[in-house]
């Protein structure tokens, strides 16, 4: 099975320092939905692993998160794409949970759900915590320069073997 793990905000859709708090605020990065469709068409299972501390902060609730994801699913369907599963952490950093990236809880859940190890599985993110969570379990970290990606690259300290691409469409082109 070919599997790829994507962060959501800054990889699939535009990010916001004020959080994506409604379906209206969710806007895809040009080319990202088509890139996911291409991955699907080439046999990839596309899984999202996303920190959503806006829930823990009280900025939005579960029905709103579901509505945001519904918009994402419908937008993908319009271009022939799909996301097979969405894993999310609703906790704030202060909760010190095991699922919030850079910890590996979500990645371990993905591994268990699909019955595969994550060695060499591409994991695409725009922040250091995305890359660290992936690298910790042997997945291949891909940094995209969309979202917070340029700032992440400038700060340095990327996990060994991190591959850097302008956006998800470029990652997809390199994998296919």
Image (cartoon, rainbow, N blue to C red):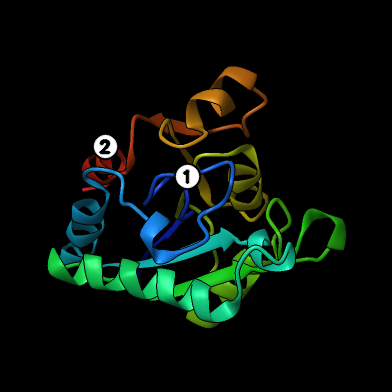
Query: In the picture, residue 173 is in which quadrant?
Result: top left
Local secondary structure at mark 2: helix
Q: Which residue is mark 1?
A: 15
Above or below, 165 relative to 59: above
Local secondary structure at mark 1: loop
Position of the N terminus, as image quadrant, is bottom left
Residue 43 at least partly seen:
no
Q: Residues within 10 Å of mark 2 (few under 14, many from 20)?
A: some
Where does the image place residue 124, in percent across and percent down from the top left? 45, 47
Q: Tell me how far mark 1 sits from mark 2, CA to CA.
A: 19 Å
Above or below, 50 relative to 138: below
Residue 46 placement, left or right of 10? left
Where does the image place residue 66, in percent across and percent down from the top left? 47, 77
N-terminal-most mark, 1 or 2: 1
Where does the image place residue 17, in percent across and percent down from the top left? 58, 41
x 53%, y 56%: residue: 119
Residue 44 at least partly seen:
yes
Q: Nearer the viewer, residue 39 or 96?
A: 96
Query: In the picture, residue 73 is in which quadrant?
Result: bottom left
Above or below, 142 relative to 1: above
Labelled disc at residue 170: 2
Where does the image place residue 155, in percent across and percent down from the top left? 64, 20
Above or below, 145 relative to 4: above
x 86%, y 56%: residue: 94
Residue 166 placement, left or right of 151? left
Q: Residues within 10 Å of mark 1 (few under 14, many from 20)?
A: many
Mark 1 or mark 2, which is nearer to you?
1
Query: Mark 2 and mark 1 in contact (Cβ < 8 Å)?
Result: no
The mark total stands at 2
């Amino acid at each position: 099975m070919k599997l790829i793990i994507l962060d959501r905000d800054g990889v699939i859709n535009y990010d916001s320092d004020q959080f994506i708090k409604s379906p209206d605020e969710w806007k895809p990065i040009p080319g990202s939905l088509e890139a996911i469709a291409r991955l699907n068409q080439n046999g990839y299972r596309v899984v999202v692993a996303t920190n959503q501390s806006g829930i823990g902060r009280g900025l939005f609730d579960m029905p709103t998160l579901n509505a945001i994801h519904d918009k994402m699913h419908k937008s993908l369907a319009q271009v022939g794409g799909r996301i097979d599963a969405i894993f999310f952490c609703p906790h704030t950093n202060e909760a010190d949970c095991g699922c919030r990236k850079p910890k590996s809880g979500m990645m371990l859940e993905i591994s268990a759900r699909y019955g595969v190890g994550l060695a060499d599985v591409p994991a695409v993110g725009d922040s250091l915590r995305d890359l660290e969570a992936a690298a910790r379990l042997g997945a291949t970290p891909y940094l995209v320069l969309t979202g917070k990606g340029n700032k992440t690259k400038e700060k340095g300290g990327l996990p060994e073997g991190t591959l850097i691409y302008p956006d998800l469409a470029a990652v997809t082109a390199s994998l296919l």
